[in-house]
Amino acid sequence: MIAIEPIKISDFSSHLFWDVNKDELDLDANRSFIVKRALEYGLMQDWNLISRYYGLTAIVELAKTFRSLEPKTFSFILTLSGLQKEAFRCSTI
């Protein structure tokens, strides 16, 4: 993925990746992990970073595969995507 401005893991809120070695995270290889953390625990600046880097379509496609999402996060993604809740894996578990 190519962003307009380079984005680094260090640009995200420090609390998002407290339990992993940030130096080992790759924005492309670990995109599912990064997006889920930013959606569920991030601040608005973290949302801006992932939406700018991955784009809404890619974020929604990833969110559709997550086994679970916090209720507020799920509502947020449903609203942004315009999809029915059944389109998401987490709604069927």
Image (cartoon, rainbow, N blue to C red):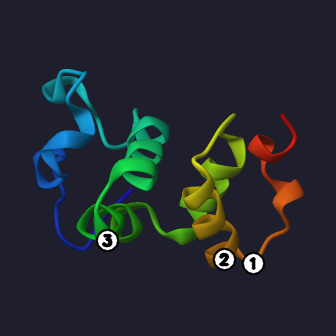
Residue beneath disc 3: 48
Tell me the CA gap for discs 3 and 2: 16 Å
The answer to whether 70 appears left or right of 43 in the picture is: right
Instruction: Please identify the quadrant where the C terminus is shown.
Output: top right
Q: Residues within 10 Å of mark 3 (few under 14, many from 20)?
A: some
Q: Tell me which corner region of the image, top left, top right, bottom left or bottom right, holds residue 60.
A: bottom right
The answer to whether 38 appears left or right of 22 in the picture is: right
Vertical order, 47 against 62 (above or below): below
Q: Where does residue 35 sit, x and y in percent of width and height? A: 44, 48
Relative depth, front residue between 75 and 47: 75
- Disc 2 on helix, strand or loop? helix
Quick one: label 3 or label 2, which is nearer the N terminus? Answer: 3
Amino acid type, callout 2? Thr
Verify CB contact (< 8 Å) between mark 2 and mark 1. Answer: yes
Q: Where does residue 68 sit, x and y in percent of width and height? A: 65, 38
Verify CB contact (< 8 Å) between mark 3 and mark 1. Answer: no
Vertical order, 5 against 92 (above or below): below
Residue beneath disc 2: 79
Q: Tell me which corner region of the image, top left, top right, bottom left or bottom right, holds residue 37.
A: top left
Amino acid type, callout 3? Asn
Quick one: label 3 or label 1, which is nearer the N terminus? Answer: 3
Residue at image position (26%, 30%) is: 25
Residue at image position (13%, 54%) is: 11
**Numbered badge on residue 82:** 1
